[in-house]
Amino acid sequence: MPRLLVLWDVDNTLVDSGGIGRDLYRAVFGEMFGRPMPQPASMSGRTDRAIAIEVLTLAGVPEPRRVAEEFHMLMAARAPGLATERVRALPGAALAVAALAGLRAVPGVADSDAALSVVQSLLTGNIRPLAEVKIGPVGLSDHLDLDAGAYGNAHEERSQLVHLARINAARIHGGSFGGASTVLVGDTPLDVAAALATGARAVGVATGEFTAAKLADCGAHAVLPDLADTDRVLAAILPARADLR
């Protein structure tokens, strides 16, 4: 049976997190250093490892890559205590995830060999505890295998997370998720670039700060205005039959 690994971004793709991630960064930095946190460049699409290293570098902290590990440990410890009432699922997100979980065949292909096993997880710049805090309260984790994904403390480059997620998914579910058998769904050019760099399918969602035109210009294979139209979401995410493995 062909397999498909669908890797969802979190912020501005599945949820509007209401800025709780920034709050956590400021709180942890203040706890560690007793002063205000310097402002990093745009966080959109970047991994927590890249962001933490930049923040620590701007603050003049020696050996920022080593200290980033301690920073993330404190973030992980504090994440469950975040006030999550500001987090909301974006329109259609829950329905899209549930529809993929219930998929038994490729729409429009009647042949029995088009049956499809879909694994869904996260590929996010967030460390895992922060990602869980953002998706859990709004019911988005029910159909996701979080162990099959990859998280932002693992590497500074998002494309490296794709390799890690494929390894995790293959270890848990067997088979291979090379090429278009992996689909990244995200709202930033960095999501698209990570997919293209690893041969994955890139689906852009214009629910963040980047327009549909910008995501298309970056090379996304499909671009959605949002996740509200479930049929349209499935059509964008599912590969052509020839690409199934």
Image (spheres, grey):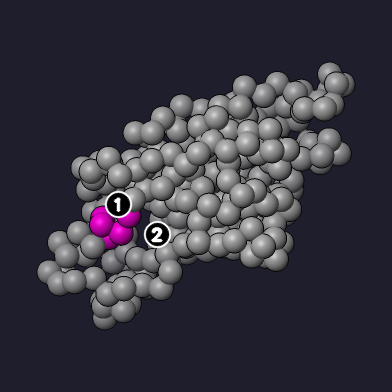
Residue 39 percent coordinates (x, y): 31, 73
Quadrant including the C terminus: top right
Mark 1 highlights which residue?
20
Q: Main secondary structure of the magenta part?
A: helix
The numbered disc on residue 187 is none
Give the residue drawn at x 53%, y 52%: 207
Quarter of the rendering containing residue 109:
top right
Q: Is residue 106 left or right of residue 122?
A: right
The numbered disc on residue 48 is 2
For the residues labelled 1 and 2, the Cα–Cα distance comes to: 14 Å
Residue 40 percent coordinates (x, y): 36, 72
Residue 136 or residue 224, whichever sits in front? 224
**How packed is label 1: few (under 14 Cα within 10 Å), some, or many (20 or more)?**
many
Give the residue drawn at x 42%, y 64%: 43
Residue 212 part of the magenta segment? no
What are the residue bounds of the magenta stretch?
19-25
The amino acid type found where label 2 is placed reads: Asp
